[in-house]
Amino acid sequence: MNWFLADSRYLRLASFTMFYLGQGIPIGLISVALPAWLAAQGISPIEIAAFVSITGLPWAFKLFAGPIMDRYSFLSMGRRRPWIVAAQVGLVLAMLGLALVPDPTNNMTLLTAMAFCVNCFSAVQDVAVDGMAIDVLPEDEHGQANSFMAFGQVSGYALSGALSASGLVMFGLLGAGLMLTLTTMVVLAWGVFVRERRGEKILPWTQGKASSRSAGLQAKNWTEIFLNLRRTMLLPASILLIVVTLFWRVAGGFYLVGLPVIAIQELGYESTDYSFLVSTCSFIAALLGLVLGPFIDKHGAKPFFIIGLLGYGVVFLIAGFWTDLWSDVYFGVTFIALEALFGQCIFISFIALHMSVCWAKVAATQFAIYMAWTNLARSIGASLYGQIKPELAQGHELILMGVMVLIGAAVLLFVNMKSHKQRLEQLDVEEGQADAVRV
């Protein structure tokens, strides 16, 4: 099959949508359906918080995967695709292992360990896919591609969250896990047949060779990677965005644990109803997010990131101060719908902005660090929520979340993208001069 990402814009959009859909499948099970199901089974908020925070840690360890991928690859199959295929194979096997956990509510340690393994492979795939996107996407496709990638991920976890919520109730973890394992195998097949550039191998034993571009981009030694990484990560815009992420994602960790606890244990929602509601709102928000991409390409990602954070923070504050409205089903649906809408705006603009911040010399590693930090901050938030929840009055967690998000929006105002791009251009000049001296 002659599917080459470098040659087809439509194949690029379809492929990154598919790969992100594959990443969304374990998210829907582990981050949406399982916490809700565990809450319905009477598992305590502290245990659920531990499950969420521990299983989310692999996403924070992505910073270790980035440099390895920049340094090593089987280039005759492409610069990133071998990692995608290998991670997807591991993900299929790990999903199968998760499905086979016996009596999961009485084996929380084993359940957490297997979910941790699933997220390990999913996180590795995520790094490889992001690196591939930076390698093959033209800059004027970043916004639109990110909107499709976000749509794919949300579609994956919305579909997974809805199906696994029903599957957990009707068939238990075994049925839900097997169903999602089969879905994951479809994404694996796509990764096998789609190649980055003409002339590359489909599989190790087939005909093909490395492209000159892939060979030229691959780092020759570890020193080159880490010295260049230090130069770009310490730029002001990079540091400020790390601070923005801290506030936004710690609040996200609160939300990930707190919402199912509030909805199911305090308000009496059924776990299936809750999962279907979250999944449906997320999917609709992802559809609406598809129209955002061209505007980001035209006007830049920063304004939309600020809008998303402001809306996110205000929604949390309203819900936190008006707790007497929680029992109103329309208020609950509106809250979840608005959270999904502003969250999608943040997600798309966040990825596009961070792609623009990266320096081409170490873009995959740098981007992996940013993404790892988002997940580490979320795990910190999830763990912190479990510790402080007993001390909070009703609604106080949502007020804290709103304040943190708004602080993040305030810090984002100081990010100067024009100045940052000038600094990256200067780094390119300095690197070119250094290369000339070495020659």
Image (tube, rainbow, N blue to C red):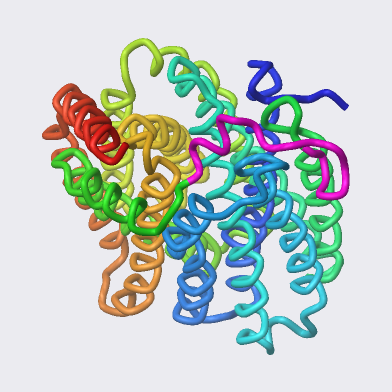
User: Which of the pair 63/296 is nearer the observer?
Assistant: 63
Residue 249: where, in percent of width, then height? 34, 53
Q: Residue at x 87, y 42 (%)?
A: 206
Q: Is residue 39 above or below residue 33?
A: below
- Which range is magenta? 201-218
Residue 78: where, in percent of width, then height? 66, 39
- As drawn, is 291 to the left or to the right of 193? left
Q: Quadrant of residue 246?
A: bottom left
Residue 436: where, in percent of width, then height? 27, 32
Q: Is residue 427 above or below residue 176?
A: above
Q: Residue at x 44, y 32 (%)?
A: 348
Q: Residue at x 76, y 41 (%)?
A: 191
Residue 333: where, in percent of width, then height? 51, 41
User: Which of the pair 50/236 is nearer the observer?
Assistant: 236
Dominant secondary structure, magenta: loop
Can you say which quadrant of the picture contains the C terminus? Answer: top left
Does 212 lie within the magenta span? yes
Outermost residue toward the top?
298
Query: How many discs mark residues in the rendered view?
Result: 0
Q: Residue at x 64, y 62 (%)?
A: 121
- As drawn, is 285 to the left or to the right of 338? right
